[in-house]
Amino acid sequence: MVERVRLADDLQLSCRVWGAPSERGIPIVMVHGLASNAQLWDGSARHLTTHGHGVIAIDQRGHGTSDKPDEGYDMDTVTDDLATLLDILTHRDESWTRPLVVGQSWGGNVVIHLAARHPSKVRGVCAVDGGTIDLKSAFPNWDDCAQHLAPPHIAGTRYDRLWAAIKATHPDWSDDAVDATLANMEHLPDGTVRPWLTRERHMKILRGLWEHSPHHLFSHISVPVMFTPAIDNSDFSNRKHSALDVAEQHIRRCKVVPFIGADHDLHAQHPRQFADVIHDAITEGFFA
């Protein structure tokens, strides 16, 4: 079920709702990455609900079918969006009190920020190939970061051509996962696509991420934090290892479960495996 939740006069977030938690489960809220969308959590959400967990996946502001105000894309504001949503969910149904909040990539940094800024609202957070992103370490100058990480010009590409290209480069992904990736785009009547997240808003989020230094927050986090990084033999993965070492040294309760050889969107690539990692951590009492 898709529901729109009003956070403010100018902001409603679109949420994919997979039901409330049963007596044997807990509430889980899932947060996508930059230029992504809630549908990429569908596979993992299905598996988690079979274990009795309640799951809600959100489109953050500017993304998917959520509202798209021109401002509010800094880290504090998007994190406060999430905190407000948690308050609304709890007010409507006490079974949603203090959920586990899971975020991927930029969303991983958002949930780390949430854990430091609003610890009483969560029982813990999980950062999926994110949460340690520190763009300033790679790009000390914002203009360099903007030049290297600006989004590609995809608007006007035919949907079927883009679908085939994604499937060809991700042959182990399900068709549902490819469809979910294409849900990052508005599908136009002429058969082409246009990103839901505009380039201008994308760059505002990127600037907020560039200004974010999650390692400064680690020692202030009191709730459990799990990281599920995608790891390979690249220099980039070596930098992830170093950042995760810092996290393990400074976060009071920290767990790292690497996905070896996985894609950045590992939750879409390996939905059942990812759901099992989350469920195992819950049943072992890590997020108690």
Image (cartoon, grey):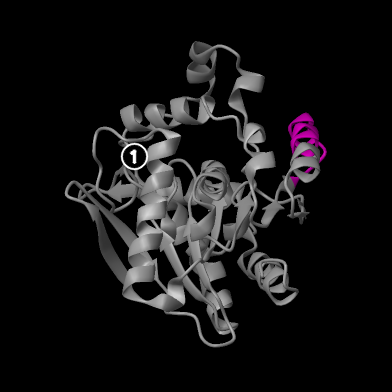
Question: Residue at 56% across / 42% down in the picture?
Answer: 109
Q: Position of residue 87 (x, y in %)?
A: 37, 61
Q: Of all residues shown, which one is farthest toward the left? A: 9
Query: Which is nearer the eye, 280 or 199?
Result: 280
Side of 20 where 261 appears, left or right: right
Which quarter of the picture shows residue 208? top left
Side of 216 where 260 appears, left or right: right
Query: Which is nearer the eye, 69 or 212?
Result: 212
* Position above or below: 145 against 231: above
Q: Which residue is label 1 attached to? A: 197
Query: Which is nearer the eye, 36 or 217?
Result: 217
Question: Residue at 74% across / 50% down in the picture?
Answer: 252
* Position above or below: 146 against 161: above
Question: Residue at 56% across / 68% down in the picture?
Answer: 44
Which quarter of the picture shows residue 272? bottom right
Q: Main SS of the magenta segment?
A: helix
Count neighbours of disc 1 (C-alpha within 10 A) and say few if under 14, some if 14 to 19, many if 20 or more. many
Query: Which is nearer the eye, 261 or 44?
Result: 44
Q: Amino acid at mark 1?
A: Leu
Question: Residue at 40% across / 42% down in the picture?
Answer: 78
Q: Secondary structure at mark 1?
A: loop
Q: Which residues are magenta?
A: 231-244
Residue 201 visible, this angle:
yes
* Quarter placement of the N terminus: bottom left
Q: Position of residue 189 (x, y in %)?
A: 20, 50
Side of 210 where 77 appears, left or right: left
* Position above or below: 269 against 154: below
